[in-house]
Image (cartoon, helix red, strand yellow):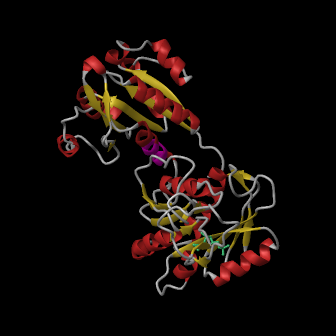
Amino acid sequence: MAGKLSGRMLLVVDGPAVLVHTLEFLRLARQNGLTVRVFPTASALLFQSINAWAAYSGQPCREFERLSEEDLQAAEVRLAAPASVRLLELLLQNDQTARYPWLLAPALLPEDKPEEVQQSFAALLQKHHKLLLPGADVSDLGAMGKLALASPGHCLEAALAELIPQELAGVRVLLTVGPTIEDIDPVRFISNRSTGRMGQALALAAARRGALVTMIHGPLADPVSDHPNIRPLAVRSAQEMYDATLAEISRTQVAILCAAVADFTPNIYTEEKIKKQGAEGMRLLLRRTPDILASLGQQEKRPFLVGFAAESNDLELNARHKLQSKHCDILCANDIREPGCGFAVRTNRITMFFPDGEKEELPMLSKDEAAECICTQIARRWAK
Ligand code: C5P
């Protein structure tokens, strides 16, 4: 699935429309290549006109009451968000609409209990329907009160899961992501230029294929993706990343070690800020940090291992050596001297090396696209 996704979506918006929610959802959906046709109910039209919805979605818009068989059939994914209880009953009891699978995001009152809502609709929900229940977020509609609704990000991910083959469904994936920070004293540290973007792209690509991702990460340049399958665990130093990874490893089926782990850490941490007065220079003594990937490779029951290598010379030779010495199943290498590759940029040109002697050379791609290609290889090779 390299490259951009495309998909036709039908969105029913019911009153009271939570405009900020729907606008954010439409922005995310369009950014992810979905074409969304909005069908507002009569009560939603009390808040926004047909023309406003057409402009927000960039597509022709019609009233929900005029939704046809053709519209239902043309859509690859159907979402009702927000959906009042009345709309839910209507969609699920009407033979014409209930035949198609729906994603249903009910608008709840903050005091409603999601489990009770789920139970009350259990009889009506056929297997192909999914109820998207709210997390902790509550939308404040001012004078109209408060509503709880699944977040725009969760609605988007549920829609994408209908379109993307779930080839890693239920697979427990562990990722190490971003730089580590090695503290010298309370204000100074050693780190590197990693942004965590390659790792974040991999976490999202794996989660979108159905994997359950634990992402152990250092400080990141971007916020963690809002995906229900991603569980972030923040750490700081290489030692903390090592400890967190080993604590998770017995539950892990695929480990992707993408972090730019500091190779050295100060020998001692100085509790008080080191003073410069009177000193011409200073000597900082460093010691090696644990190699997380190498230790996983040595485990008796090791997970499927994906390693990374940023090389500045003899790419293939060094990558093949790392593949073998660290017992990886896939080694993703890139040449850091090439412009647009590696640290602090949004693109990368990766070559994947495999133990059977094969390799796959990817062209220069966005990190999101490269992550898709890596996940395709993982899905192809891990269960063999
Ligand atoms: O040996 P080198 O650092 O080039 O290996 C890179 C690979 O090893 C990456 O996958 C990186 O995440 C992992 N690594 C690690 N722990 C370290 C150093 C590197 O897991 N201390």
Ligand 1 image-quadrant field: bottom right
Predominant SS of the magenta segment: helix
Residue shown at 18% from the left, 36% from the top? 111
Quadrant in the picture for residue 337: bottom right
Whether 306 is among the magenta residues is no
Quadrant in the picture for residue 169: bottom left
Q: Where is 20 relative to 132, above or below? A: above
In magenta, the rendered stretch is 157-162
Where is residue 145 drawn, in percent x and y? 24, 23
Residue shown at 26% from the left, 27% from the top? 146
Given residues 256 and 304, the one toward you in this image is: 256
Res. 356 visible in picture: no
Given residues 157 and 92, the one toward you in this image is: 157
Q: Where is 54 relative to 207, above or below? A: above
Quadrant containing the C terminus is bottom right
Where is residue 246 drawn, in percent x and y? 44, 75
Residue shown at 49% from the left, 39% from the top? 76
Residue shown at 33% from the left, 15% from the top? 42
Q: Is residue 366 left or right of residue 24?
A: right
